[in-house]
Image (cartoon, rainbow, N blue to C red):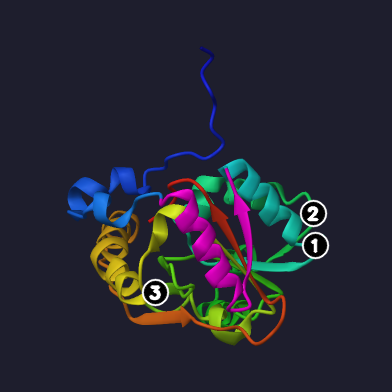
Amino acid sequence: MAQVTRYTHVTQYSAANLMADAGVDQNQWSRIPDGATIDRTVKAIEQRNIRVILADTGEEALDALIDLIPAGAEVMNGYSTTLVELGYNRALEENRKGWRDYHALITAENDTERRHALRRKSVAADYFLSGVQAIAESGEIVGCDKTGSRVGAWPHAAEKLILVSGANKIVPTLDDALRRCREYALPLENQRARRAYGSPSKIGKYVILADEVEEGRITLVLIREELGY
């Protein structure tokens, strides 16, 4: 049988390479639900006025992300292991649609005050992309972060919010979703932060998307694969 080359890939900061030191329970917090559960969850999310694009593979998901963002649009993303595993960073570097990349502007700015000002403006980008930490079967989508830089765009600031998630982040209830943040996502992110920045992480901000009043503002690309943490 020919070997299948997967577009998604494991990086040094993927869960598989952080799990041993993080001491988390993968069996409890990172399983792919059955098809009926995924379909029921999608319906619950859509009833909260959040569009869902269901992708079978990472390749399909990346194509969907690129198609959602028009040529020349202003884009920003918070750090997301899921986006990295999908290859979004590579697509952003190639930038075949001529997007105006806020992240590139921020990293190129050497003045501290101007860099902070750009970061604040970036949460109101035309298109903000982000991973998520948990999804309840009842339809709530949960994000958490140390400073809020990755979830500040969620409630209102970004004109269009595009979320990406593997189906492994689906849990039965909102309480379970908050527990997943604390007991699974945080220990793994803490290990990543220590290795990447030399400092620990913590949860300083939670955002729960329970209902969206603006039609078409939020899209979730949900992938039937285990991606991110």
Labels 2 and 1 touching (C-beta < 8 A): yes
Question: What amino acid is at disc 1?
Answer: Pro
Q: Which residues are magenta?
A: 33-56
In front: label 2 or label 1: 1
Question: What amino acid is at disc 2?
Answer: Lys
Q: Residue at x 46, y 66 (%)?
A: 132
Taking the image as shown, residue 105 lies to the left or right of residue 184, namely right
- Residue at the outermost right position: 71
Q: Looking at the image, which is closer to me, 144 or 45?
A: 45
Question: Which residue is tagged 1?
Answer: 70
* x, y percent for residue 210: 50, 82
- Residue 19, compared with residue 180, is above or below; it is above
User: Would residue 166 be seen by someone viewing this image from the given angle?
Assistant: no
Taking the image as shown, residue 47 lies to the left or right of residue 21, namely right
Question: Which circle's residue, 3 or 1, is located before the other in the chain?
Answer: 1
Question: Which residue is tagged 3?
Answer: 144
Q: Which mark is residue 97?
A: 2
Disc 1 on helix, strand or loop? loop
Q: Which quadrant of the structure image shows residue 48?
A: bottom right
Disc 3 on helix, strand or loop? strand
Q: Which mark is residue 142?
A: none
* x, y percent for residue 79: 48, 62
User: Would residue 73 be seen by someone viewing this image from the given angle?
Assistant: yes
- Residue at the outermost front position: 36
In front: label 3 or label 2: 3
* x, y percent for residue 19: 25, 48
Q: Residue at x 58, y 44 (%)?
A: 56
Rounded to the nearest whole Å, what is the CA distance between mark 2 and mark 1? Answer: 7 Å
Q: Which quadrant of the structure image shows residue 215?
A: bottom right
Labels 3 and 2 touching (C-beta < 8 A): no
Q: Is residue 36 shown in magenta?
A: yes
